Image (spheres, rainbow, N blue to C red):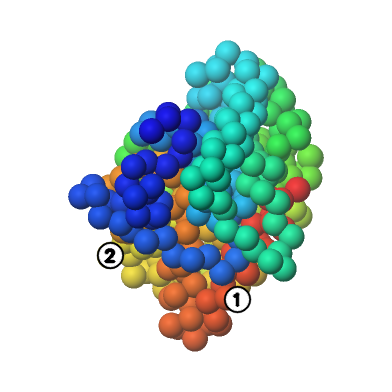
Amino acid sequence: MAQNVALDDLTLADGELFHNRKGEACPLPAPLAPLADTHGHLTSLRAHDPAMAIARAALAGVRLLVVPLDPIDDVPGRWESVPALLSWIDEQVELARACLAECAEHGFVPPAFEGYDAPELVDNVRIVAGAHPYGAARLDDGAMARLRELLESPRCAGVGEIGLDYGPNSKIAYPIQEEAFRRQLRVAHELGLPVQLHIRDAVGDIRCGAHRDAARILREEGVPETGCDLHCFTSDLRVMEMFTSLGCHIAFGGAATFSRSDEIRKAATFCAERFLLSETDSPYMAPVPLRGEECEPAMVAFTAALVADVREAGGRGSRQASYDALWGNACALFGR
């Protein structure tokens, strides 16, 4: 098979986009509306070619992909300049466009969504830009200048991921993280952009200190009028309500599908429809039935189906209503 085709031999044989490690098909849930992956790290994929990942996402029904970029880790960490990084994103999109044309020759085309104003995915790859809490100590004037340069991109849809991380991998003191968070929140206010939050509590912290501190900072600085997204939600109903009370959206990813994630599923069930979002956080936390694989944007189809299922089972509206909310909210927040 040609390397620039997003289909492997198993897919060509049985028509299914996903297979487990045994080669068994993992049928893709049929989306009832266009899908949105509001947080997919194209720059961090290892097992998947980024352009092929975009093409595969399109085949799964994804019509909006938001890619986080970091003015410290990405530039100058892996690209020498902001223009070089943005050019790389453009190149991946065009390679995906060519790949989809070749997929069509094999009979594989993205699903149609009649009645929806949904651009093709290759015309709707957006970015958010922000310094992750891990890089807070390096958010100097140069990094802030790179951040502003990224935010000038026509693809820009917001500031992020920014926030607080008290987890075991974070070595940055809280005051330094807080200052970086506040500086970037102020940029979002200045430019009229929404923010995408990364908040992680310390292991075993039942008080959810990082989330409490982040909510306090949002109250003090103000939630941008253009919106806020609590990315990679892995907490409970209490934490969710802490942020929805501020008007923040809640993004559910692959973790919601895990067997021990009852609290996340409860939050997804009772989250107000107007705050629902879907994401992958690829390449991390692939959803069931592909847990353990490298996550890719196409896998948001499994999470969207899970959210729709638990909400219908909990009497919170039809599956169709949940799919429509996941799509409409993503467009309203990031489809600028």
Q: Is residue 84 above or below residue 94?
A: above
Disc on the earlier residue, 1 or 2? 2
Q: Residue at x 38, y 55 (%)?
A: 16
The residue positioned farthest toward the left in the image shown: 22
Q: Answer yes or no: is residue 271 visible.
A: yes
Q: Is residue 296 above or below residue 60?
A: above
The residue positioned farthest toward the bottom in the image shown: 315
Q: Residue at x 43, y 48 (%)?
A: 200
Q: Secondary structure at mark 2?
A: loop
Tag 1 residue: 321
Label 1 packing within 10 angstroms: few (<14), some (14-19), many (20+): some
What type is the residue that disc 1 sits on? Answer: Ala
What type is the residue that disc 2 sits on? Answer: Arg
Give the spatial CA distance, label 1 vs label 2. Answer: 26 Å
In the image, 121: left or right of 241?
Answer: right
In the image, 187: left or right of 272?
Answer: right
Tell us which disc is closer to us: 1 or 2: 1
Tag 2 residue: 260
Q: Residue at x 64, y 41 (%)?
A: 122
Q: Secondary structure at mark 1?
A: helix
Q: Is residue 154 above or below residue 228?
A: above
In the picture, residue 227 is in which quadrant?
Answer: bottom right
Label 2 packing within 10 angstroms: few (<14), some (14-19), many (20+): few
